[in-house]
Image (cartoon, grey):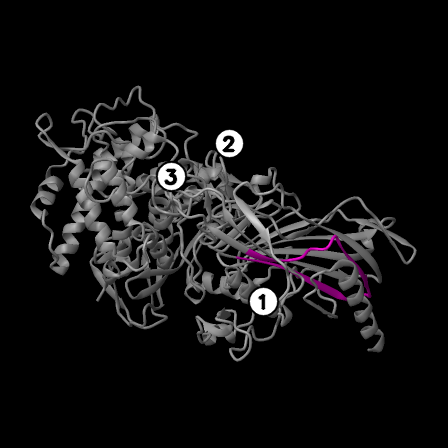
Amino acid sequence: MKKHLLKILFFSIVICTSLSIALHYHQKLEKREENVFVELTTSRVLDSRKIDPYTIQTRESGKESRFNSVTIKEDLTAKTISTTWISNIHKIDPYIIQTHEPAKEDRFDPTVANGYVGYRVYGETIYKNGLYNGREGNSHRARIPGTLPYVVKSSSTFETNGKVYKLGSDNLYLLNMKLGFFSEKYSFIDENTNENNVLCSISQNFYAHKVLTRLLITEIIINFNSKGSVVLPLNVRSGNESQDIKFNYFNRKNFEASNAIAVCGNTLVPEQEDGKLLPVCYCSTDVPKNISLEGEVGEKYSFTFITSISDSLDEAKDFYILGLKLSNNGTLFSSHCNEWLKTWEYGSLLIKSGNITQMHSTVSGLYYLLSAFPPLSSAKHPYEFFGVSPGGLTNGGKDQDYLGHVFWDQDFWMLPALLPLFPEAVKHGIEYRVARLWAAKEKALNLGFRGAMYPWESAYTGLDVCPGISYVKYEQHVTGDLIHILRQYVYLTGDWDFLFQKIPDSRNNEKFVTPWDVIYETSVFWLSRTQWSEKYNAFVIDNVMGPDEYHSPVNNSAFTNEVALQNMDFAIQVADKYDLPLPEREHFKKVIEDMLIPYDDELDYHPEFTGYNHTTDRVKQADAIMLGFPLMSNNNSIISRKNDLTIYGNTTVSDGPAMTWSMFSINWNSMGEHSKADNYFLHQYNNIQLPYQIWSEEPSGNGAVNFLTGIGGYLQSILYGYLGLRIYSDNIVLNPRIPPGLDSKSVTSLHVIGLKFNCAVLDVIVQKTHFDIALKGFRNNKQCTVLLISNGSSHELSNIGDKYSLSLTICKIMMK
């Protein structure tokens, strides 16, 4: 014991005086099995009487006060991280991607994010939710230089105890999506005996904390297999000085974590004239040049490096200090992992297949999408959410990945993919739009219209920051796309009260707006966009750009006209339900009844716009085919839908954006044309870049990454295609079948865990000949009875655990 204490004292002196290392905890541990990749605590995660990751101490007027003080739920405090979720690296696990080879390009490296901050592993840049720099069309995500260290791997050798050790060739990269972290592991081996004599193994873990969302963390763990010493050089990949933020470095005095750097700054250019510069602060562990260690057999050393990012220095410090305390008591990592476990328990989607890539694709798609949205526990440490861009939170710098702006991609592609499992995430996305109604009204006014016209590209303020003037003027369907997902959210959840929830105006927090305000103002916008045409004997909308951006401006985009009339129809439905005044009700009704949806009598299909020529006009992406799904237009017979799919299947370019093929697959599935649906479904896998399942906008790897729009389309093709989910005002319908397998590997089952409908939570497992529906639980503290109707018979699910099996046929689900 005395020898061990002297060793710790010597080690501490060396670290503190020579290296200024951030050693947050050090302890001697038993030698662990080599196939367990990460050491996890087996004690209770947290005791609510001790340090609470859901509670922050803040400074107000020099005093400490409770901030968001809550009682931890018992299921969290009592839960340990079961080692069954830590996969043996020799086994196949749909939640764990492991490889010995790095990504072929840096842009395809894995990402870690939590909805507030994120970065690409091995990258030089951190991005923060809502932090943009640049005026109007020059707006883009503001770059925060990287702060977290990496162990530098080189050909250097170490001599200890008369033996020379070198870097081994056993690198293992692991993305653990179940627990939400990325890891890299390698060894130093005896130069003479190659892989047989290991001095020590090194693990580096990277994660964005799922509860303490201001924190980004790197953990470096060294396990000694032999007695000896090692020197590990560290490098912070920060790149060049930020061109977006002017930083000031503060004195470390009066900061409890004396080994941390405290930095604050502001963006350089506001989004609008007379707009404000956006603040950002971070506290980050000061990183030494290297770690020098001496170890005995079986000893383990752990180093934790923390970066805390916020709008204010006080909050950044508070989160940093709490992270430090949790690290010291060994619960920083476990509290993060438990939150991911809760997330997967709350909702998950899995294809069980003989092809591990296919199994990974579904899990990784949901993992990357969820990483861009606030976590389930976000109410504990709330922050203003600024939406999700096509490349997510980890991409979108200057001239990259759509600049980090929010498009229709969020409302029409990502949110519908999350809605059945994570309606709370959908609500966050809608609230971002509602809070910026003022900006949509301002845009409509500037262009000579009434009501609210939502921007094609949005960032901090909600004003249009699109750099292309034609998109700003003509791509108006985003306004109706927002109402489409709002209507679907209300129908599925039964949360009609949300339509009247008061949401702070983003420009003036003393004012409030509601989703109903958005429904009404957008309907008025569409009314002001329509005009009566004697030529067509119908209402028309001229000078627009539909989803197919190859053609603009056009008249009577079939897609745009349909979302417009559905927008107005929903306004009437809500007004009737709640007896609300609707001054132009009769005008709305007439426009809805007589809106022109282009139709070719001879070919029995829907031209994309008036004047469209299917023999010469190429199409960029899914457009008119979406009259079938997701719009479910009333102006659409089965025959014309098949003709739409056939004609546009021939005219849509093969290298278009990834999400296109999901709509072809879903719509062919609904037609019973399973072979065609399967071909389009499998086509989507061309956009997945291995090994980390990063999606590219184009199959060649070009375009935006990690393309959450394509991920959203892919997940929709499973939920609305192979599960056959359809959402109506008072019921949902399932029409399931098994998806096709990759590389002739058959799919055995499709698992949809935590499907939310009204007050019920359902598990649905689809197999080759039948599917099971089980009542998993209830939502919002309400108990209800689920009624299943299929083939003329009905069955009730009333108690948790109730289950019913059906053949592969249509099943209508209602609340009794």
Nearest the viewer among 663 and 774 is 663
> Looking at the picture, which amino acid does disc 3 mark?
Val
* Within-10-Å neighbours for mark 3: few <14, some 14–19, many 20+: many
Disc 3 designates what residue?
Answer: 465
C-alpha span from label 1 to label 3 = 37 Å
Disc 2 designates what residue?
Answer: 700
* Within-10-Å neighbours for mark 2: few <14, some 14–19, many 20+: few
Say which element carries label 3: loop
C-alpha span from label 2 to label 3 = 28 Å
Residue 476, placed above or below residue 40: above
Say which element carries label 2: loop
Marked residue nearer the N-terminal end (1 or 3): 1
Marked residue nearer the N-terminal end (1 or 2): 1
> Looking at the picture, which amino acid does disc 1 mark?
Ile
Start-end of magenta stretch = 282-309
Residue at x 40% of width, y 54% of height: 385
* Within-10-Å neighbours for mark 1: few <14, some 14–19, many 20+: many
Q: Is residue 231 visible?
A: yes
Disc 1 designates what residue?
Answer: 321
Relative to 224, 373 lies left or right: left
The magenta stretch spans residue 255: no
Q: Looking at the rendering, which quadrant does residue 479 occupy?
A: top left
C-alpha span from label 1 to label 2 = 45 Å
Residue 191, placed above or below residue 347: above
Expressed as whole percent of the image width and height from the top left, the position of residue 351 reads: 45, 51
Q: Looking at the rendering, which quadrant does residue 412 occupy?
A: top left
Q: Nearer the viewer, mark 2 or mark 3?
A: 3
Expressed as whole percent of the image width and height from the top left, the position of residue 571 reads: 17, 50
